[in-house]
Image: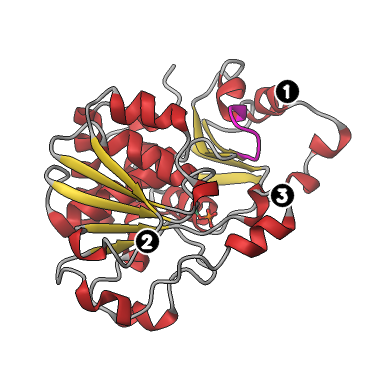
Amino acid sequence: MFHLNSIQDLTETQIDALISLAEEIVRDKAKFREACRYKTLATLFYEASTRTRLSFEAAMHELGGNVIGFADAASSSATKGESVADTVRTVACYADIIVMRHPKEGAPMAASLKSPIPIINAGDGGHNHPTQTLADLFTIYKIKGRFEKQTIGLCGDLMFGRTVHSLIRALSRYNDIEFVLISPEELRLPDYLKEDSLNRSNVTFRETEELEGVIQELDVLYMTRVQRERFFNEADYVRLKDRYILTRSMLRNAKEDLAILHPLPRVNEIAVEVDDDHRACYFSQMLYGKYMRMALLMNMLEVSL
Ligand code: CP
């Protein structure tokens, strides 16, 4: 059975097919409004979410399916000590597919070993967030029309940022991609990702602490939040949280067709004044995420019109 744990579970051809389906859905939403009739999605969120959970729920509703689940483990029998594996076995009696977010790295993957129905990883700790990457890829494709031949700046928390990790894994497979990794020393990209994804694929990358020194080179700038929930020490979080704040004046030297992405939620790292800039793509990115999740649900539930 196919589970989506990592973006590497999808080939480039499969990603292309999901993008084509998402485009078809955007073009003719009415055609798909019963595509998942009689199918049920269960959303098991052991960690907070707005976009991922609600866009999956909206996606299933727009495909004519049903949704059950919990938005907070505190309202589930996890509080009584039930294991994730037993919860999944239970939910499989009531649903056809599970979307799971969990603060522990690997939890959705471990659950998938016990699950009789497909599981989609909706974010596991600081590890992976493959459906955010599908949203990011669709956004880049819609705006740039290609993945190849681009300089991609990734800025902020590259250490714990699961969206960054998944995006690097995805884009490293395309030709002529160059990454500029912009972070404080303490939040640099983990070495295992540099080895597994960048060096192994001969992808050009460099590391810097200065956003303003490189912004003029970038085709895509992927801003990220410094995540309070991943820090062990509040003082470190406070010291690093406002290290990067993208302002309108910083965009003076940026390319006219720069695409500014952010998985959201944002805190301070993009000033609100940037929202009106034609290069700000992070609100469309949220919407594109819903269409890619519709395409993914159809694909994993093996439904067609
Ligand atoms: N981008 C993202 O995962 O947002 P949420 O935490 O709101 O789901």
Q: Does the magenta run of residues contain 279?
A: no
Residue 169 sits in quarter = top left
**Label 1: which secondary element:** helix
Choose the circle earlier in sequence order: 1 or 3: 3
**Image location (x, y in percent) of residue 262:** 40, 60
The quadrant of the picture occupied by the N terminus is top left
Badge nearest the viewer, 3 or 2: 2
What span is colored magenta in the figure? 102-107
Amino acid found under the numbered disc labelled 3: Asp
Identify the residue at image location x=65%, y=40%.
103
- From where the camera sits, is residue 64 visible? yes
Mark in the foreground, 1 or 2 = 2
Q: Position of residue 278 (x, y in %)?
A: 23, 76
Residue 166 horizontal/vertical position (percent): 40, 38
Residue 25 seen: no
* Residue type, mark 2 in image: Glu
Tell me which secondary structure the magenta stretch mostly adopts: loop
Residue of label 1: 86
Q: Circle 3 is placed at which residue position?
A: 72
Instruction: Name the residue at 36% across, 67% down.
Output: 283
Viewer-closest of 198 and 129? 198
| Mark identifier at residue 210 | 2
